[in-house]
Image (tube, helix red, strand yellow):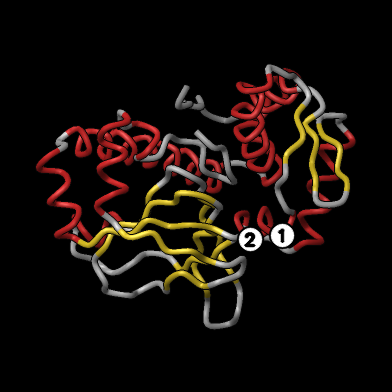
Amino acid sequence: MHSTFNSYTPGLLDLLPPSAREALIAAGKSVKLQAGQVVQSRGDRQADLGIILSGKLRMMTLSVDGSVMLTSILGPGQQFNEVTLFANTARTHDAEAVEDAVVLTLTASEYEGVVVRHPVIVEAMLKSNVYRVHQLLEALNDLRALPKSVVLARVLLKNARHIADDRQANSVDLAITQEDIAMFLGVTRSYLNKTLGQLCELALIEVSYRKIRVVDLAALENWINSQLTYTAVEDD
């Protein structure tokens, strides 16, 4: 699994056995995207499933005033636009390529055809989306109930945990841009800088150009727990 911004759950491809994964990829069409390329617009009615094979996509909502509300950045293995297939609704997000990427697209008929041959795909899709709903509900609770400094700390901790799982390190460098964090929190860059500064003063993080270092994962988690007003339910 690839940890990206505000997206820490396994994607569809992460949960499939090799045979089903290969069949799913063979059933669709791979599309190459350039960094900054707009992939889709919120409200589009086209019914298809997208799966990221490489690169990352920024899932967001563009407002009429030009502001951006960021939901997450998805990475390899993760899917999007499930609602267009299963609920017959419009696409819920604007999306753009954060970097050069390859996206697999499947029409409704292509998806249904491969699922008949590999029903394990249905179970994997269900699990992936349950994980994602759990994550988003926790994020919603945080945004409504907690100070921005604690919300920010929780986001950084969740990213760092998944990187540390691979590197077995307690100090972790996060390649998360301050612009993306500000768009997710719904704050200005100056407000974000102030909030980052609060965590720096507590010696929990260090901030440099285009990089945030979590100095001590255990200390960051202990501080968050001391600030929470409810029991956090994690997806460990």
Residue at 75% across / 29% down in the picture? 172
Above or below, comparing residue 47 to residue 231 in the picture: below
Q: Amino acid at mark 1?
A: Glu
85 and 90: which one is in front?
Answer: 85
Judged left or right of residue 149, residue 198 is: right
Which residue is the site of mark 2? 183
Which of the 4 quarters of the picture holds residue 221?
A: top right
**Percent x, y for residue 129?**
32, 41
The tag on residue 179 is: 1
Q: In which quadrant of the rendered view does residue 28 lie?
A: bottom left
**Kind of residue indicated by mark 2:** Met
Q: Residue at image x 19%, y 53%? A: 111
Which residue occupies the foreground of this view, 103 or 38?
103
Q: Position of residue 125 (x, y in %)?
A: 27, 40
Give the CA distance from mark 2 to mark 1: 6 Å
Q: Contact, CB < 8 Å: mark 2 with mark 1?
A: yes
Q: Secondary structure at mark 2?
A: helix
Query: Of 135 and 50, which appears nearest the observer?
Result: 50
* Left or right position of 164 against 132: right
